[in-house]
Image (cartoon, helix red, strand yellow):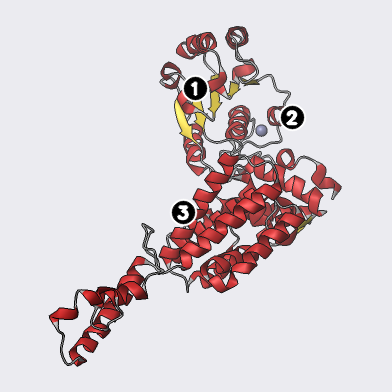
Amino acid sequence: MNETHLVLARKYRPQKFKEVIYQEIPINALQNALKHNRVGHAYIFFGPRGVGKTTIARILAKRLNCEAPEDNEPCNQCTSCVEITRGVSNDVIEIDAASNRGIDDIRGLRENVKFNAMGGRYRVYIIDEVHMLSIPAFNALLKTLEEPPPHVVFVLATTDFHKVPETILSRCQDFIFKKVPVLNLQSYIETLCKTENLKFDSEGLFWIAKKGDGSVRDTLSFMEQAVTFTDGNLTGAAVGKMIGYHGIDPHETLLKSILEESNANKLLEILERYFAEGIDLSRYLWDFLDFVHSSIMIKENSADKENLNFPKEDILKIQQLVSTYRTESLLLISERIYYIYEKLSMLRLRNSYEIKIFLEIQLRKLIHEINKPSLAGVLEKINHLNEMVKKDINHLPSHSPENSMEDKKSNHPGDVEGTLKDKFSGVEVENYPEIE
Ligand SMILES: [Zn+2]
């Protein structure tokens, strides 16, 4: 357990190209350049945070100066490799442009660049968050990139490619780094769990990977919090509790109570219970919206299941649940819930009690709307009755013109208009989307 208190991201920082997950394209390109001795003097690594940009820059620096590279990887044993790993090498200079964005910082760098690295080695400058540099600093950097001294390699890393001036970009080879998909993150942390001897299940790891949002660093940092919170027991139940995931049962009940009017009271019970438990009702409404939206995607088979916010066990349950509901009804619910959420956000209600009341009113309205007869249904019934009335007319012996005016408002079986009006006097037909 204590072991994991070492920052996981640092402990498991890749020391070889092959240990970096999911960035094969830039890695292959770099390894090819290394193999053929065609390493450029300036690279720009672009991609989201925590996917391995500076890690790869350091591995590149190690590989360039390694005394005994193997299979195009640094040996991690020689003095140079060890110094770079420990962060004490004079051959690797790292600059965080977010906190050193001025011209003086880059001037200092230009002076430094003039000194050649010892013994024909490479000097690697890694400028992280390079888009943060000021314009004068970019100009100073540009001068250095225009006349690169031999054996100097610049690696500029950025999460915001478009903020880097074109003049700089045109002098760099650019490599794109990608977000790491949930499944890859999940299988990566599964290996770590085994090494660290942590208890886990696939749902627990799913939530950790999901929280990482494509970033290895964020995934590991969340995993560390989860280890502390769950006392090293990374199961779906424990991690779900940590992030406020209550499973799909409450969503299922709410959906049923909206679609089946007989269950409407359940809705009030759910809101009442969540209110009493102090659960953020506005967040719950958003989660429910996500559930309905995902249900539609699952029903229509249009979802990339990996991008859904539900573990695969729950996706199977949702599939079964929504198989009996019509897509149109689900679409209408998701649209209305979004509208309610939007309205709720704008109202800035003062407390959870007010939110509860607001939701009770809005959701009841929705139940009423969903379960009232639709225009299509009403027309169908009218046609049906029309047919019945026509049959009745055929059975009447005669129809005299004298009584037609006076009998307009009567319930005379021959008066088609009057009969239908009476039958449907309680039905309003408004401009609602059609549902049945
Ligand atoms: Zn080495």
The residue carrying pointer 3 sits among few (fewer than 14), some (14 to 19) or many (20 or more) residues within 10 Å by Cα, namely: some
Residue at coordinates 39% horizontally, 58% vertically from top-left?
Answer: 432
Q: How far across and how far down the image is residue 278, in percent?
A: 75, 52
Q: What element carries label 2?
A: helix
Kind of residue sitting beneath label 2: Arg
Residue 266 appearing in the image? yes
Q: Which disc is residue 285 wearing? A: none
Q: What element carries label 1?
A: strand
Residue 71 appearing in the image? no
Kind of residue sitting beneath label 1: Ala
Residue at the spot of label 3: 335
Kind of residue sitting beneath label 3: Glu
Q: Of callouts 2 and 1, which one flags the residue occurring earlier in the amino acid sequence?
A: 1
Toward the viewer: 279 or 264? 264
Cα–Cα gap, marks 3 and 2:
54 Å
Which residue sits furthest right? 2
Q: Of callouts 3 and 1, which one flags the residue occurring earlier in the amino acid sequence?
A: 1
> For the residues carrying marks 3 and 1, which lies nearer the camera in this image?
3
Cα–Cα gap, marks 2 and 1:
24 Å
The image quarter containing residue 436 is bottom left
The image quarter containing residue 13 is top right
